[in-house]
Amino acid sequence: MPTMTAPPRLFDWPLRRLRLDRALRAGLPADFLRRRVAEDMAATLSGIVRQFHAGVDLSARDRLFEQVLAAEGLADRIQIVQRIDQVGPGLDAFQDNEIPALEAATSDLIVSILSLHWTNDLPGALSQIRRALRPDGLFIGALFGGSSLQELRWALGQAELELTGGAAARVSPFADAFDGGGLLQRAGFALPVSDIDRLKVTYADPFALIRDLRAMGETALFAERARPLTRAVVARMAQLYLERYGDAEGRIPATFEIVTLSGWAAHPDQQKPLRPGSAKTRLADALGVKEGKL
């Protein structure tokens, strides 16, 4: 009989929690990307003609999503009743795939804001999320995609290759955006949708970018530690980054690709997908959003 093998352990989640805790204790978290994602999710949910009174937030360390819901006047219609904090008390509740044991068919909404790209078993996490949803329950999750930090990845790799003759992985291998819909289907979601938003954020220099990544708790978390970077490699990285990507004012860009996945737990009253190749489901239809005119 075939044997089941555990997914490779790419990321060190205890270290992830320590870094999130450190970023929070520093008092100056760089949350502009998480806030943008939370606002986009709230806007999507505001157009869905139904109420969600049994919501779960899988990235609730600062209750940012609930703050946004309140600011948009949605707190009565969309209620978060379970919060999965990634730092602080209750860390023992997390399992190996970084998703706690959620009770089956108890939630009508599950959201995750920029955390699932760190999971060691994304298909397993999505399957567990799907099981926790009630029929016709909705999942919306955002994670960083494969183009994120492509400039930093190139500059670090090139600098290390030049000075040491070899390059180690220094930037995390973010999820491939084009696999999103397939992962949702494998996990059993109905009407799966994968959407991509690419942002360019400019910084004074690469060191300002790295400070922001630390404040986000988004620096690399490889389970297998690479050799430490030398000062010479870091200095050469900054030089290469500026030479290749810097603008006329000496500022450098950083790409953040945000992949938003959404899917429903199956229900008999949901619309059925069309035959393959006959048409594509619109995002508004899949989410049950009323479209407005520009």
Image (spheres, helix red, strand yellow):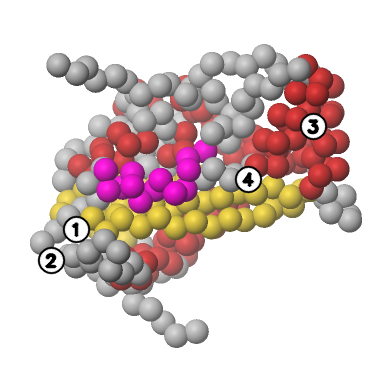
| Residue with the mark numbered 2 | 269
Residue 237 sits in quarter: top right
Q: Which mark is residue 237?
A: 3
Point out residue 252 in the picture as x, y percentages from the top left corner: 78, 48
Q: Secondary structure at mark 4?
A: loop
In primary-sequence order, the first of circles 4 and 2 is: 4
Q: Residue at x 70, y 36 (%)?
A: 154
| Residue with the mark numbered 4 | 30
Residue type at numbered disc 4: Ala
- CB under 8 Å between discs 3 and 1: no
Residue toward you, 126 or 178? 178
Q: Secondary structure at mark 2?
A: loop
Which stretch did the figure color magenta? 174-186
Q: Is residue 68 above or below residue 175?
A: below
In primary-sequence order, the first of circles 3 and 2 is: 3
Task: Please tell me how crowded label 1 is: few (under 14), some (14-19), or many (20+) other residues with Cα within 10 Å.
Answer: some
Q: CA distance from mark 4 to mark 3?
A: 23 Å
Residue type at numbered disc 1: Asp
Q: Residue at x 36, y 31 (%)?
A: 121
- CB under 8 Å between discs 2 and 1: yes
- Specify whether residue 267 is in view: yes
Q: Is residue 214 above or below residue 113?
A: above
Point out residue 195 in the picture as x, y percentages from the top left corner: 44, 58
- Specify whether residue 79 is in view: no
